Image (cartoon, coloured by chain):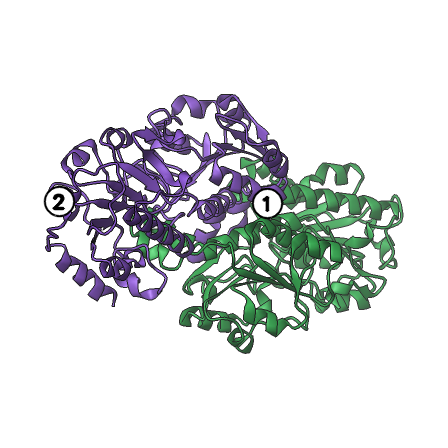
Chain colours: A purple, B green
Amino acid sequence: MAMRRALTSAVKSVTVNSALSSSSFTRNVHGSSGSSKKIVGVFYKANEYASMNPNFVGCVEGSLGIRDWLESQGHEYIVTDDKDGPNSELENHISDLNVLITTPFHPAYVTAERIKNAKNLELLLTAGIGSDHIDLEAAAAAGLTVAEVTGSNVVSVAEDELMRILILVRNFLPGYHQAIQGEWNVAGIAYRACDLEGKTIGTVGAGRIGKLLLQRLKPFNCNLLYHDRIRMDPEMESQTGAKYEEDLVKMLGKCDVVVMNTPLTEKTKGMINKEMISKMKKGVLIVNNARGALMDTQAIVDACSSGHVAGYSGDVWYPQPAPKDHPWRYMPNHAMTPHISGTTIDAQLRYAAGVKDMLDNYFKGEDFPPQNYIVKEGELASQYR
Amino acid sequence: MAMRRALTSAVKSVTVNSALSSSSFTRNVHGSSGSSKKIVGVFYKANEYASMNPNFVGCVEGSLGIRDWLESQGHEYIVTDDKDGPNSELENHISDLNVLITTPFHPAYVTAERIKNAKNLELLLTAGIGSDHIDLEAAAAAGLTVAEVTGSNVVSVAEDELMRILILVRNFLPGYHQAIQGEWNVAGIAYRACDLEGKTIGTVGAGRIGKLLLQRLKPFNCNLLYHDRIRMDPEMESQTGAKYEEDLVKMLGKCDVVVMNTPLTEKTKGMINKEMISKMKKGVLIVNNARGALMDTQAIVDACSSGHVAGYSGDVWYPQPAPKDHPWRYMPNHAMTPHISGTTIDAQLRYAAGVKDMLDNYFKGEDFPPQNYIVKEGELASQYR
């Protein structure tokens, strides 16, 4: 069935819907009720995995589970994973699409150039959270609306961060390698395995994910710290027991584990560089499920090699997909995976439902939930400023 | 320094302390004050890892950090990892040792035969928790005292269980394999990755470790169940939100994740067999840091191969060390490690301190903390009955 869907989508992609040009003046305005739209979704392909789980809606084949609903209302829906370069399928549709749905897990980079060429584009939806693959300034200048499914994967990412903290602190992977390689050497694991209890954990950023992480860390009896532009409300502070650190560098110097929970912006790009790492404790562990480009790639490799950073785990890279020769794949003491934490089956069902709701709002000319807007009427949401 | 210690210990092991035979009548009685004792410790060897962490006291080289203290009081202290067979170093000392310190992480099997031959043995101390490598009935019949460092690694094991639950539920390992193999296939991970939130987790046994696990699971908003011989106190039930399940089989049928937290006894040996697995949901995940022999080894292999069990993780095997051809090393969807969860650096420091305290009590003829006794005056502690 998955294969049949993919074929149907490929056939549709060459059909041009003649009703589309009518909305070319309405950038920045929600679609007028009743008009037919050309909607393009860019997701990762599942191939043989597509049919293995009926709830696997986040892939090309699953198409967020909204194809029948969209088509029954007369809209055109094209879904592809082919996103890069001038001959990609996405590029073929840039000139006349009205809505582009992208995802952080297989990011279609929406550059200023693409925005300029997308004369009919009105709405950019992110299936998930994190829209830094979109040139938000260019989108704002062009009067586009950009929105995410805020909250859809915050629990997923916070859980995943806690998993990675435990994997590093408890030195899980060397033991796993022994198990599959027929070995047994407890000492080779134990000499650097610790309990999480009693350690100092600091989160750089305490938005929704950071707060959910702190709540989940609470029963572990750690020393919890957070740095952000503003303090969280006193109730959340007392609920999590986390202490506010106004000075980022001072906080980093106290941490056994540093967790990144801050969006990627021009200001935060490459923020964890050689100098920042030198302010951290020798043997610090770093977990980063936020964005790969928050890090200076080579500084992380060097610090893992020297042992100053005793372990690094995350699911985000720059660029994505990570090339075969990305050095983080091969540095010592890492626990990396592809970008996966926010695309569990549960998260997919949530962000698919959120995208559907926003499309429904859009067709009806209604507003989205306010927290979903990343760019609205030429303005960026506060976390991207 | 570690190497020097090992050599010193080897030399001492051939020195016979002539004062020892005086206490051969005092089995079951704490050592009389002032007499010199022969104490043997059996731990895992650390080799090149011994010198990498000054707190690495749980290995042969670290010797629990009590050598200077013991020797300054005139006791003989022999430490080895050589524990199996008639020509092992442990066997050489069986006939005249007074105290034997063992550890579950490198278990010296103390059989009825060994107990019979250990004419001067008075005290069996477990550095850690879990004394099923000792024939407790035989120890009781011989009037020996058996004691553990109760509580020393319960936090370590509970943390480790939560890590393994997250690793299985979130399908971490396929992503890690992709990362190190130069691959990128989000779909191949995501089709079976889930959030922990909302899932049903059941613990078989809710002693100290089970309770600590439930407390740490609380903020994840799961449906928590537990089975035990008796209900926990109402305050703990309401604090963790866990529901009591009197009928084990009924509970197993409800769980997305089953966690084993019950000691190994004649009654629990092999309890998770083909029939019990057939009562569980298809796709269940199992975490077992309790004891390998709670499982029917082949039934687990078969269920992981068929997919009825979608993932199995633990650090316990039977026997230990697991032989190179142990089938759990090679079954699908496992996340196994050697026996490690309770021997983090933090746990080592706790159980080394606990062993030292009990030896001090023993030399002074004082009682141990009551919760530490496994066999006292011919009686087994309740959890081993």
State the residue at coordinates (42%, 41%): A313
Task: Nearest to the eye among marks 1 and 2: give it.
Answer: 2
Question: Disc 2 residue type?
Answer: Ser
Question: Disc 1 residue type?
Answer: Thr
* Badge 2 element: helix
Whole-angstrom CA distance, mark 1 to mark 2, is: 65 Å
Residue A155 circle label: none
Q: Is residue B199 left or right of residue A379?
A: right
Quarter of the rendering occupied by the C terminus of chain A = top left
Q: Can residue B318 be seen in this view?
A: yes
The chain containing the residue under callout 1 comes to B
Residue indicated by mark 2: A21
Is residue A170 or residue B14 the one in the foreground? A170
The chain containing the residue under callout 2 comes to A
Q: In this view, does A361 lie to the left or right of A115?
A: right
Is residue A63 or residue B121 the one in the foreground? A63
Residue indicated by mark 1: B344
- The residue carrying pointer 2 sits among few (fewer than 14), some (14 to 19) or many (20 or more) residues within 10 Å by Cα, namely some
